[in-house]
Amino acid sequence: MLKLAREQILLGQSVATKSEAIALLAGKLTEAGLVEAGYVDGMLAREAQHATYLGSGIAIPHGTTDTRHLVKSTGVMVAQFPHGIEWDEGQIAYVAIGIAAKSDEHLGILRQLTHVLGDEQAAAQLKEATDADTIINILTGATAAKEAQYLTLADFPADDRDQLLLGAAARAKSAGWGDATMVTSLLASDPAYLGEGIWLARAQAAQTGWVLATPSSALKAGEQPVNAMLLLCAADSSHLPQLENLAKLAAAGQLATLAGSDGLVMLQAGPASGLAETFTIINPHGLHARPGAMLVKVAKEFESDIRVANLDGSGEAVSAKSLMKVIGLGVKCGHRLAFRAEGVDAEAALKGIGEAIAAGLGEGVH
């Protein structure tokens, strides 16, 4: 979880260029003892490779992999530029978050930041903020509206349906969605059978989210198969779209797809449409800014609507044409990305994306 102190927030800054903004952030990272003095060269080199502007007035300058040895400790500095800086041609940044990361932990920072900054209203509030606490609350999500979260529990060694439900409940509890009372109420409940081996359990919770649990071996509850257990933890109404998708999947006879590797994608997208492919990321440092931008660039070359989910992450499906959303998936080396394309050039889109990923997304991975 990203933690910020007031001394990490630089309010009301005014510089003329992007380079000056980066030098300011690098200097503050150095003063804080997070990096060696030469780290600024890595930050400027990263910008030369690809601008780190995310959208919504936000930029995230950080160093290259070659300068990671200059990082003493992972951390960030946040500078606010109320008058704006042209970060890239036609792209104005009002907030720049300088990141120092020793290894891939910066992906976790990026994931949290991009999730918060994807809100246009939050970006405007960052621009207009006049105190450090407001910026801290926005960046750490304290003032952000909570969205439904997604977790998986694959191949769980359950002996029966109730044990599978217990595993799902424990997963939700460990994520902080509920407490022991929630687990107790779930175990006293009777899950609903939706059909095609899919079961649904529900509980009131502190955070809305879904857990998709699948057993390691074939199970039955009475005469019905148990291929997957869906646990809905409900704190508000943000789960309603997924309930609608469940109804659509049932009507289309596609509930069984929920027990597959991209079950959470189906829960969010509804009945299958278009074409789907899954590719594994081979970049040693995952989808940081440069390969992430290359993936988005390839996706934007096609007319089709393209969605992508990290099967080894949250499972949330996002637009493959949004750099902010793609980086927010927190993709590391070896993670599997499930793509779904719908449109006139869907087949060509998936082929192009697959080829780009196999080629290393601009990093020359072999």
Image (spheres, rainbow, N blue to C red):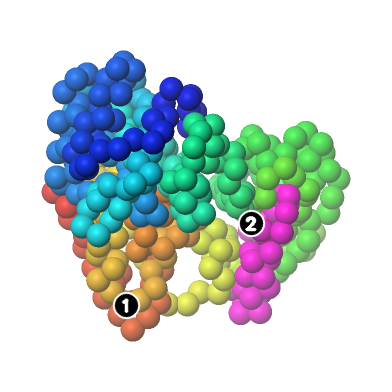
Whether 260 is among the magenta residues is: no
Instruction: Kindly identify which residue carries mark 2.
Output: 228
Residue 153's disc number: none
Task: Using residue 8 as the reference point, say whether residue 189 is left or right of it.
Answer: right
Q: Quadrant of residue 267?
A: bottom right
In magenta, the rendered stretch is 226-254
Residue type pointed to by label 2: Ala
Q: Which residue is outermost to the bottom?
A: 344
Mark 2 vs mark 1: in front: 1
Q: Is residue 71 above or below residue 305?
A: above
Task: Using residue 39 as the reference point, say whether residue 114 is left or right of it.
Answer: right
Whole-percent x, y for residue 56 in the image:
40, 54
The structure residue drawn at horizontal position 67% and vertical position 59%, both measured from the top left corner, is 239
Residue type pointed to by label 1: Glu
Instruction: Kindly identify which residue carries mark 1.
Output: 303
Whether 233 is among the magenta residues is: yes
Does the rendering let one see residue 216?
A: no
Q: Residues within 10 Å of mark 2 (few under 14, many from 20)?
A: many
In this rendered view, identify the residue nearer to me: 46 or 281: 46
Q: Is residue 242 above or below residue 76?
A: below
